[in-house]
Amino acid sequence: MQKDGHRNFAGQFIFAIGITLAVAQYSTSVAEPQKGMSSPAREASGTQIPTDDLQRSIRINRYHLVSKSGAMRGETLYFYKCWMCHNKYTIQAQYGDKAPFLHLKDLFKRSKLISGEPVSDDTVTAKIKNGGPGMPSFRTNMADSDIADLVSYLRGGNCCVEGENPPMNPWYRAATQKWSVPTTLSGGPRGLVRIASGDLPEGIMVQLIAPNGVRTTVYTREDGSYEFPQMQPGAYTLRVAKPLEYKPYRRDSIRIDGTTKLEDIVLERISESEALPATLDVESQLSDVEVLWNLAGSAHEKQVFNKSCGCHSFSQIFRNRFDERSWRLIANRMLHYGGATIINPSPGASTGGRANPEDEELVVKWLSRVRGPESKDAPVFAFPRSRGRSTRVVITEYELPRVLLSPHDVAGDSKGNIWFTSHKTRYIGKLDPKTGIINEYALPLTPGALPGTHRVTVDKNDIVWLSENWAHHLTRFDPRTEQFTQMKIETRTPVNTPGFGNFAIAPDGSVWSAEAGQSQAGAVMKIDPSSGTAKVVAQYPFKTVQSTYDNIISYDGNFWAGGSSAGPGNSVELLDIRSGKMLELHTGAHLSTAARGGFDPFGNAWFGGRDGALIELDAKARRVREYWPPIPYAPFAKFYEAMPDKNGEVWAGVNFGRGFVRLEPRTEKWTEYVLPEPFSYDRRTWIDNSTNPVTVWYVDYNGYIVRIQPIE
């Protein structure tokens, strides 16, 4: 069990996203047109196409975020496959004077590899395919075309991506294509979905993509009918998002004007039975837990994997085909390098890992069996679609100007703008929800520190506050002057390890964090940033934990709360700021692993539980209660955060799932909103309580901002 919940937890997810997410086994060739359908090259306006590459998850799995081939695609491959080990921050910390030889920048300007072989396309390709003593073999995970694109990037002058200038997103068009984003929830174009096989058409996601790239998705009722919000007149792309069981449906240049009655959408199944072929297009539309649920193996094997390896994402771990040697290298890195060592590794060091040796070996053997080079995929089954109240929602997706950002948090200001952070680059941004236009701001680089921001919050004066967790800065940004003020936070961990990430701002302007300071015992710190420095003015020590994952402050500023997402994993802490009394509550033998959250209007603290429940700390009764959602993928679903709204209802993205849940605690009524992409990688929810119903915002770690507007 890890000793420091925040540091190890954060490090695990960085590796999981940066390494195991990267190495999909699929070929990236474009699918052949289906019989009777035109090829994409010959597609005429208003016709269907066989492979809808507008499905973001498919484009991610093919590494087509920027380009479909060549060095630009190679940069995407490098980010996912190579960066975690071959970034200059890791190499410098681990290898010192040898770092220039191990960093891949200017690789093709050298005469020899470290092995002594001459540098050439052939020798570099062979190294990628064969791996080495500490490097997995990628020959069963990357097609020859993938490796050729990666080598092309390494040969070019732009290598290697370090978060300072991430590539532009070709899907972002809001700045050049001026277009209004819908503000209503109904009253726009409408239509009907029919399914030729006679399947119930309820819960089909119908989507309109505007010229500015903003996507609006609505859901069919039981009779197959759907209705969009009022849209600006013009030409749109109409498609079915995540069709999964059905052939893709897409029509370009559909004219929308007012309450346009659209032509019926007729869907055809891709299989006559419930079993679906395990193709790239199908599996890319499954959520993490659907992939896990469909894999072979015992419940014990899957749960050990879930407990050991699943911090933020494991769906794409399963899109690997590694031999046992390579899986063992990956499992060792995941389980024995926590947040204190993943970016700044110490060779041979271990942070205690998440699994004991027996469990670690079980995970390696299981992955080698179900995702080895010779393993075969069985047909897959999808979870049921949305029904009833879950279809009464409008989802809007906004593109970001750049890709490979690893966006983390969002927060709104008084003018309705949405601010977001980027976990591995120097950029933050401000979204205008009415237009989709985003203004970017580049933070000053800190010499020797990985760029990246974590938490963002906006105070009552519309000043934006950020945590630069790799550089250990509390950063103030004034949008009026566009000036940054970076304040150093003293922590127990070195630069390039996550020593300052989650913080809260109290009504009096003070900053609260359980990570700041050098107290070995662990304490909550009150920080005064008013002078432009991070001055610790008070400390409140813990008794049984060293830190908590989150730091939240009640609306009245009288209480601080946090939860332990790792060791001991079953505690929630409450500080009465007025008296200075610290209360530490435990959930018993069950590891609730409370992560991020917020206070509700009644003074209760809520957290997303990493073990699958929403966790309430009742401030008056001084007790902890867990709420378990009735969703089909329990017990593999997890929550990173839970955020109450003005009514006391609690919202949370299902981190391994396909959408958001909404809980009414008094009645224990749950609603699940399935999203148009198979992701709900929600790190921080911001709720706009000025609307009725409330509006829910989050930024997906895959690189786009999502607005959720329930109709009831």
Image (cartoon, grey):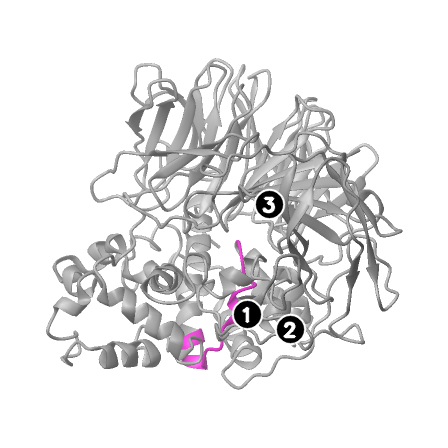
Crowd rating for badge 3 (residues with CA inside 10 Å; few <14, some 14–19, many 20+): many
Instruction: Decide whether residue 279 is among the magenta residues.
Output: no
Disc 1 secondary structure class: helix
Secondary structure of the residue carrying numbered label 3: loop
Residue count near mark 1 (Cα–Cα under 10 Å), binned few <14, some 14–19, many ≥20: many
**Front-most of 197 and 321?**
197
Give x and y (percent) for residue 452: 36, 42
Left or right, 631 with reference to 59: right
Mark sitting earlier along the chain (3/1): 1
Report if residue 474 is visible in the image.
yes
| Residue assigned mark 2 | 295
Identity of the residue drawn at 69% across and 75% down: 36
C-alpha span from label 2 to label 3 = 30 Å
Instruction: State the image coordinates of residue 45 (x, y, percent, origin top left).
Output: 62, 57
**Which amino acid lies under the numbered mark 3 shown in the image of this protein?**
Asn
Q: Name the residue under label 1.
A: 318
State left or right for residue 704 relative to residue 8: right
Name the residue type under label 2.
Leu
Relative to residue 27, is residue 168 depicted above or below?
above
Q: Which residue is depicted at the point 24% across and 81% down?
A: 122
Task: Residue at 52% x, 45% y: name it.
Answer: 704
Q: Which of marks 2 and 3 is nearer the N terminus?
A: 2
Amino acid under label 1? Phe
Which of the 4 image quarters holds residue 291? bottom right
